[in-house]
Amino acid sequence: MSYLQLLGLVAPETIVVITALVVLGLDLLILREQPLRHRFWMGAAFAAFGCVLAAAWLLFINSPTHPAGEVSGALPLLRGMFVDDGLVRLVKVALLGLTVFTIAISMESSFTGHVGEYLALILLATVGMMFLVSAEDILMIFISLELTSLSLYILTAFNKRNVKSAEAALKYFLFGGMSAAFTLFGLSLVYGLSGSTGLREIAAKLEQPALDPLLVAAIVMTVIGFGFKVAAVPFHLWAPDAYQGAPTPSAAFIASGSKVASFFVFAKVMMLGFAHAGGSGSWHAYAPGWLPVLAVVAVASMLLGNLAAIAQSNVKRLLAYSAIAHGGYALLGILANGPSGVTSLVYYVVTYGLTVLGAFGVVGLVEERAGEARISDFAGLGRREPLLAFCMMIFMLSLAGIPPLAGFFGKFYVFTAAVGGAKDLGLLWLVIFAIAMSAVSLYYYLQVLKQIYVVPVSAESGSLGAPISSRIVLAVIAFGVVALGCAPDFLVGRLLAAIKLAAL
Amino acid sequence: MVDSQQLREYVPVLILAAVAIAFAFGTLALSVVVGKWANRSRRTGHSTRVKDIAYECGMIPVGDGSSRLSVKFYLVAMLFILFDIEVVFLYPWAVVYKSMLVDHANLIFGSMLTFLGILFVGYIYALKKRAFEWKS
């Protein structure tokens, strides 16, 4: 395989990398003397253009010819390191879309003067996520995970004038470093046990009736590592501080794009790599393996996330705890352990990412005006800013899971997948618990909406003075949430078709 | 199943861990116990201020233990590591270059060219950001 072929294979990633470098150079060399707003607009437009180009490439050019997914005829070096099938492409397009929206909601922000660096880091994190989604090799997974994480740490610390931002980044970094160590240790045990780094080969080597104690340790370490990434209880401690302290667009990116990629690769590692070490989390047929471990983590996430969110007075923290709870729901998709589980998981995290991105967009605008994002700062938003308030209502209700919004169908698919995933409705207990907990979650989402629509406007607060572009972006995101909810088949149908080919 | 042979391979690691922990805590404990006894003045029976001063090559330590360094030092150190790693990466590449040149000529050449290209962008960036100028 020649180098050009290799570049052609990773063309979307190459496009995004080049865009990142060009944006960096553009800002440093040409736009340096321009006013901040101008620089942000130019940089963001170029970055978004690169993402759209990459997405277009994924959708239209060089569609995968090997339905089995693996790059056949490649160097043996490449086997499983980079998988390019329909499912992966769909997830990548979704990631690029989320990146574009992240860039769009950060276009008007004023927290930093380092525009080029900011946009370049977002794009590099996106490249990391794209490679992460493609990887079926534990080394590649680790490297892309690090590329993503390192960019996200810096993005969290990007508000240099704010002490909280630095604190958040430090916590995120320390927890993330710890989790990376756990992941690496777990994966090294896996390599020691199986003697290979490809997930499918690992699964074939680990096919034994009983669990090796080293394998148990490996599974637990890997779950800890990825649990940190997706902020599942009890590895969630960084999330509230990171979400609250980080600049709002960065927090939105951590909550959306990084979640999508991490959950996808988490599912891949568990379902492919540990395919024969699943055990069972059913209430009547318990068997040791990763399924019961994840079931416990899911229950803890849903319980703590939802209950702790009730007590929050800061909307960013509230969204952080709600993200933990949503991580718990999404884990049900992995627990379903099969094609329907993957479909529901991807649909769930993508729609969740879109919704939370919009919610953070509104929160960012309120924060810009009020200096903080307390729930009381939203008082009377319904009369001050009817459009933004309406968007926020859509996002909150979607997060709570009210039909016909995307959040409802996300939960619906995940729950049905989990019910059908185990023999004899074995995971029914988990689904019943999840439904009960999502009823609890309605309370705190409605608390925010109550502030927006019921609490009277105080005299001094007027409109937010939000720029027209932010309004348009948020309206588009809200429309997307409604549209994905009204026509879920648009995404689910494609996912199912892709999974059938991908043989996951 | 528990493979005792496999687990036995970890015994040296366990011994190393035990030695490391014993050394770390042992020296601390030893310096507390022996230090108290050795620092005691023969005449009065307690330690004196002079004997409690940290030993630093015979000089009398003056000032704060943690002095502030200019942030430039860190910048230079980071840039050094960056380009140092670049060279370290070039060595193994150079070693396999000839053997891979036969079948995968443009792969071996192109990948390093891309790597150097990206690093070159980083170099231009550092230059333009005036990271190499000591005086700001």
Image: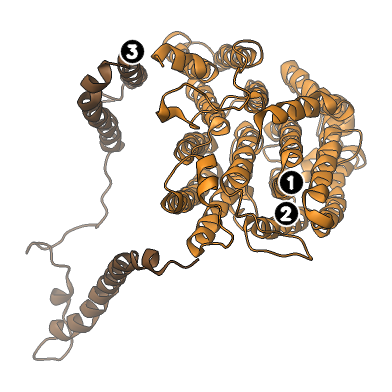
Chain colours: A orange, B brown
* Circle 2: element type: helix
Marks counted in the figure total 3
Q: Badge 1: few (under 14), some or many (20 or more) residues near its Cα, within 10 Å?
A: many
The CA span between labels 2 and 3 is 52 Å
Name which quarter of the figure residue A197 lies in.
Answer: top left
* Circle 3: element type: helix
The CA span between labels 1 and 2 is 8 Å
Q: Tell me whether marks 2 and 3 sit on the same chain.
A: no
- In front here: A156 or A265? A265
Q: Quadrant of the C terminus of chain A?
A: top right
Kindly indicate whether the residue at mark 3 contacts the one at mark 1 (C-beta within 8 angstroms): no
Marked residue nearer the N-terminal end (1 or 2): 2
Of the residues shown, which amino acid type is indicated by label 1?
Answer: His
User: Which dot, 1 or 2, sits closer to the camera?
Assistant: 1
Among all residues in the image, which is located at the extreme left?
B58
Q: Badge 2: few (under 14), some or many (20 or more) residues near its Cα, within 10 Å?
A: many
Name which quarter of the figure residue A63 lies in.
Answer: top right
Horizontal placement of A416 versus A9: left or right?
right
Instruction: Report x, y in % for residue A454.
Output: 93, 41
Q: Is residue A112 visible?
A: no
Q: Mark 1 lies on which chain?
A: A
Which residue lies under the disc numbered 1?
A: A326
Q: Which residue is drawn at 51% across and 11% down?
A: A34
- In front here: B130 or A502? A502
Which residue lies under the disc numbered 2?
A: A305
Kindly indicate whether the residue at mark 2 contacts the one at mark 1 (C-beta within 8 angstroms): yes
Q: Which residue is drawn at 64% across and 59% down?
A: A293
Which residue lies under the disc numbered 3?
A: B106
